[in-house]
Amino acid sequence: MTNKSTAIDAAYAAVIAARFLEREGCDCENPGPNCPQLSTDHYEYLAGDDSVVYEFPLINSGAQSGYIIISGSRALPPVLEFCPTGNPLREDLTKCLTGLTKLRALESKSLKWRYFGPLDLVAELELESGGYYYARLPNLLVLETSERIRVRAPKFSGSESWLEARWNYYESEKVPKGTLSCSTMFGIRPIKYNQTCESSLHSAEASMNNGPNYCTPSCIAGCVATGWTVLAGSWKGAANHGSELIFSDAPDWEKDWSSSYGGPPLPASKTVNRRMWAVRAYLGTSCNGNTTDTSAIAGSRLFSDYGLNWSWGSRNGVDYAFASSVNKAGQPGLLTAQSVWVPGEPPDGHAFVIHGWNDNDQHVSICLGWGSAFPDKWIAFSTLSSVNAFFVSLF
C-alpha cells in the first residue's frame, strides 16, 4: 500500500516524469516520432504550507518543448500537468510577473510561487514597503494583505483506490503501458483568445491601474465569455454540422491573441472581440468578470447568432467520466470549475475548453484562453473543483 505521508523529492519526481514520458506522454498525449525529454533543471512551487510540486522543463532536439509537473505528495495524482510545446511554465509566468511589477512599481524582497492547481498559479511577494502582494497569473487577480495568508493546498476529488493504483503504476519499474482510451482529437485546434477590457471595443490603448484585475476601472470580459468564444472557434475549425458559419464575418478569426504581461491583452480580431462582448452581455457578467453558474448556459446564444439552432445541455458537478464523454462523442466541450485560493472570499470560477482525454491518467487536454504565450496542456481532472459541463445535446 502506498504511504501517502512520504514526501517525494526532486530526484524521485524526475523518475516519475521520465516514466510518464516513456509510458503515456508520447504514445498517448503527444503521439508522433518526436518525444520530448527531461532537461537537467527543475522548478518548485509551494502546494500548501508543507508540500511542493515540481516542474521539469522539456527539450526536443536541443530546443525547449514544454514542461511536466509532478506532485511532491502522494495525496495528489503523480502527473499534474503535461505540456509538450512552448516554454517552461515558470518562464512565461516570470515574464507576466515582471511586466506586472514594472507596471505597478512593486518592490519586493522575496518571492514564492504557489500552485493551487492547474488554473491557479500565484506569485507571493513580500513587499519592501511591508505586507504581502499575491498575484494570480496570467489570468490576473491580485490581493494585497498586511499579513501572509494561510494558503490552501490543492485538493484531490477522485477515487482513493484509483489514486493509489496510479502511484503504484509509476513507482513500479516494469509494467505494461496503459491500454485505456486516449485521443488528442486531431482536427480541433482551439484558438487562443483572451479576456479583453471593455475599453478595447473603442481604443487600442492599454490602461495602467492598480485594481484587482488588469482592466480596472474598465470592465473585463470574464473567463466564461472568453470560454464560449474559444469553444466557437473550436467548432469553426471542426467544420461540421454547419459550424463553418461561425465567425463568417471575421476573416482573422484564426489568429491567436496576445497574453497579458501585467496589462490588458489586445484582441487580434475586432469582430471576434465584439462577439465575445456580446456573449458577455448574454451572460449578465459583472464588471469584475463574475458570471453565475445558472446564467452560464446563456453563452450558447453565440451559436444561434450564426444560424446554428443547436440544442445545448449542461450538467453540474461532473466527474472525469462525464467530462471526457463529451469529447468521446466527437465534440469539444466547455467546462467551468471553482477556485478558492483566497481565504474568506467567495469562490472564483474559471471556464476553459476541453479537446482530448486520457483514461489512463484521467487527464483532459484544455485551452485556457490565456493568449498565445500559454499553449494547450493536459491536466489531472481530479485537481478541479465543482466542475460543470456545457455541450451540444442535439444538432
Image (cartoon, helix red, strand yellow):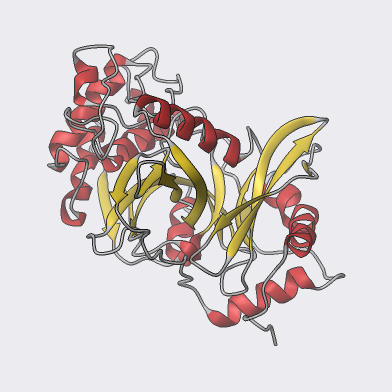
Q: Locate the N terminus by quadrant.
A: bottom right
Residue reaching furthest front? 129
- Residue 117 seen in this snapshot: no
Q: Name the one closer to the observer, 344 or 220.
A: 344
Name the residue located 32 percent from the left edge and 18 percent from the top edge. 248
Residue 279: quadrant of the picture: top left
Compared with residue 294, is residue 157 higher up or lower down, i.e. above or below? Answer: below
Residue 191: quadrant of the picture: top left
Name the residue located 57 percent from the left edge and 63 percent from the top edge. 362
Residue 34: percent from left, percent from top = 80, 37
- Residue 54 seen in this snapshot: yes
Residue 122: percent from left, percent from top = 44, 48
Q: Is residue 194 left or right of residue 86?
A: left
Residue 103: quadrant of the picture: top left
Compared with residue 17, is residue 368 higher up or lower down, i.e. above or below? Answer: above
Compared with residue 36, is residue 151 higher up or lower down, i.e. above or below? Answer: below
Name the residue located 16 percent from the left edge and 29 percent from the top edge. 217
Question: How many numbered dots are placed on residues in this image?
Answer: 0
Residue reaching furthest bottom? 1
Q: Locate the C terminus by quadrant.
A: top left
Residue 330: percent from left, percent from top = 48, 47
Q: Name the one closer to the observer, 173 or 147.
A: 147
Residue reaching furthest right? 174
Q: Is residue 298 left or right of residue 67?
A: left
Residue 369: percent from left, percent from top = 41, 36
Compared with residue 122, is residue 192 higher up or lower down, i.e. above or below? Answer: above
Name the residue located 59 percent from the left edge and 82 percent from the top edge. 161
